[in-house]
């Protein structure tokens, strides 16, 4: 939502340069932050299984260990910020003016790295304990504050892309403080105490590291796909880059809508797996697919019926509108082909199938996404979207086949 709001406000300025700059800069931050998004998923996976098995002390210790890893990684990102940003922007290769603005945006936003990674851990921990309301408060705080600061810095003070970065920085640190206070309160109500000695026990990190190293590779693969998509769009000019940025934000909005169900499925599947209740696991899968399918139908209908209205909400620049509408049919297909992989992400994480998840992701990138892009380069941006659609479809088919193999080899559709 932070990127979505930035895109909508900057898209109504008089030049596409600022929108393109934030598109490139946001891609840098997405790559660097989401590369470590395994901290949320890994924390949920390990905590949910400990919670299901009744190991309450391990639930608290897992959060502390994951937080130590997150804050350490966040500090390292700040120390290495300039080379990290420069290398990523070199790969995206935007035009010169866009590049300088994107670099400025990224070097401001990266100072929120400890807060973002710490928030990943705390939200993952709360989701595992099925405390979704607290997670909602954190995200609402972050996004409402980001909207208000965007209006202040971009519209009020005229800081354009720099203002978007400052707004994100302030919102993300505020969200982390709220998350930390809620987590401490929740832990107190659970009646468990943090064991400082647990932080120094190397063996305690083994399960987190095992899950997280698989998820790190998985995250790196999906972010490579999205960053490669942005880079290829940038090579077609700032107007195409800006148009793709709008549609990618809509794609991410849909993904995050389903992410709520995937998170719930992860927590419930992890609890069922930890307690050895295979029947309940299948029930969770059926329920997650039912609700996700309803959301998918709704989102697809909205995209199909109101493309002009949707695009106009994000930009008033006619050239950007024209390119976005020309390719909007691809966005309409995204929910239909990707719903399977988004839902099964939660089931796979909850049941500890992080390695299988990793392998399917790598195969989708290497065997489908890149070959389809290579074969359709002559189609320009249409070929780029075709490759992205093929990537999501390959993930959905691969994960569904593996789920059937592991949990319902002789059963019906859902075992």
Image: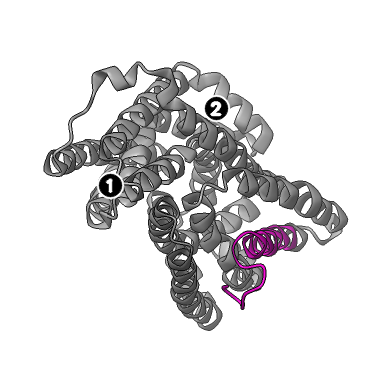
Residue named by callout 2: 85
Q: Is residue 394 left or right of residue 132?
A: right
Q: Residue at x 72, y 52 (%)?
A: 364
Q: Position of residue 332 (x, y in %)?
A: 60, 73
Secondary element at image label 2:
helix
Q: Are marks 2 and 1 in contact (CB under 8 Å)?
A: no
State the image quarter where residue 338 is shown. bottom right
Q: Nearer the viewer, residue 403 or 83?
A: 403
Q: Is any part of residue 401 visible from this angle?
A: yes
Please indicate, yes or no, whether residue 93 appears anywhere in the rendered image. no
| Residue 252, image x, y percentages | 50, 57
61 vs 46, left or right, is: left
Residue in the image at 23% along x and 57% along y: 133
Q: Is residue 24 above or below residue 130?
A: above
In the image, which disc is placed on residue 142? 1
Q: Main secondary structure of the magenta part?
A: helix
Magenta span contains residue 362: no
Q: Is residue 227 left or right of residue 125?
A: right
Q: CA distance from mark 2 to mark 1?
A: 24 Å
Q: Looking at the picture, tell me which residue is in the foreground, 84 or 306.
A: 84
Q: Which residues are magenta?
A: 386-415
């Amino acid at each position: 939502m932070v990127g979505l709001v930035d895109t909508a406000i900057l898209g109504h300025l008089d030049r596409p340069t600022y929108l393109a700059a934030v598109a490139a800069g946001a891609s840098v931050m997405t790559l660097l932050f989401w590369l470590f998004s395994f901290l949320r998923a890994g924390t949920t996976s390990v905590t949910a299984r400990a919670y299901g098995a009744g190991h309450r002390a391990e639930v608290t210790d897992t959060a502390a260990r994951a937080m130590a890893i997150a804050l350490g990684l966040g500090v390292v990102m700040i120390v290495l910020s300039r080379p990290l940003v420069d290398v990523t922007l070199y790969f995206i290769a935007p035009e010169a003016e866009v590049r300088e603005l994107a670099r400025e945006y990224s070097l401001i936003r990266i100072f929120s790295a400890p807060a973002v990674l710490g928030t990943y851990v705390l939200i993952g921990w709360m989701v595992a304990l099925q405390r979704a309301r607290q997670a909602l408060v954190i995200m609402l705080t972050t996004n409402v504050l980001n909207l208000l600061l965007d209006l202040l810095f971009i519209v009020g003070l005229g800081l354009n892309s720099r203002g978007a970065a400052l707004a994100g920085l302030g919102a993300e640190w505020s969200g982390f403080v709220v998350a930390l206070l809620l987590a401490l309160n929740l832990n107190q109500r659970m009646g468990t105490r943090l064991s400082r000695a647990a932080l120094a026990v190397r063996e305690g990190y083994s399960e987190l590291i095992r899950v997280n190293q698989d998820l790190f590779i998985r995250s790196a693969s999906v972010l490579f796909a999205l960053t490669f998509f942005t880079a290829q769009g940038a090579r077609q000019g700032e107007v195409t880059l800006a148009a793709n940025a709008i549609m990618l934000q809509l794609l991410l909005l849909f993904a995050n809508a389903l992410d709520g169900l995937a998170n719930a499925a992860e927590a419930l599947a992890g609890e069922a797996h930890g307690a050895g209740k295979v029947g309940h696991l299948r029930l969770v899968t059926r329920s997650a697919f039912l609700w996700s399918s309803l959301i998918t139908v709704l989102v697809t209908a909205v995209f199909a019926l109101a493309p002009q209205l949707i695009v106009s909400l994000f930009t008033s620049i006619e050239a950007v509108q024209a390119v976005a509408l020309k390719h909007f049919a691809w966005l309409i297909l995204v929910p239909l082909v990707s719903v399977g992989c988004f839902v099964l992400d939660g089931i796979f994480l909850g049941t500890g199938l992080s390695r299988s998840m990793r392998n399917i992701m790598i195969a989708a990138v290497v065997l489908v996404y890149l070959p389809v892009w290579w074969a359709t380069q002559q189609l320009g941006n249409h070929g780029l979207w075709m490759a992205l659609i093929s990537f999501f479809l390959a993930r959905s088919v691969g994960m569904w086949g593996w789920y059937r193999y592991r949990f319902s080899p002789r059963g019906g559709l859902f075992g």
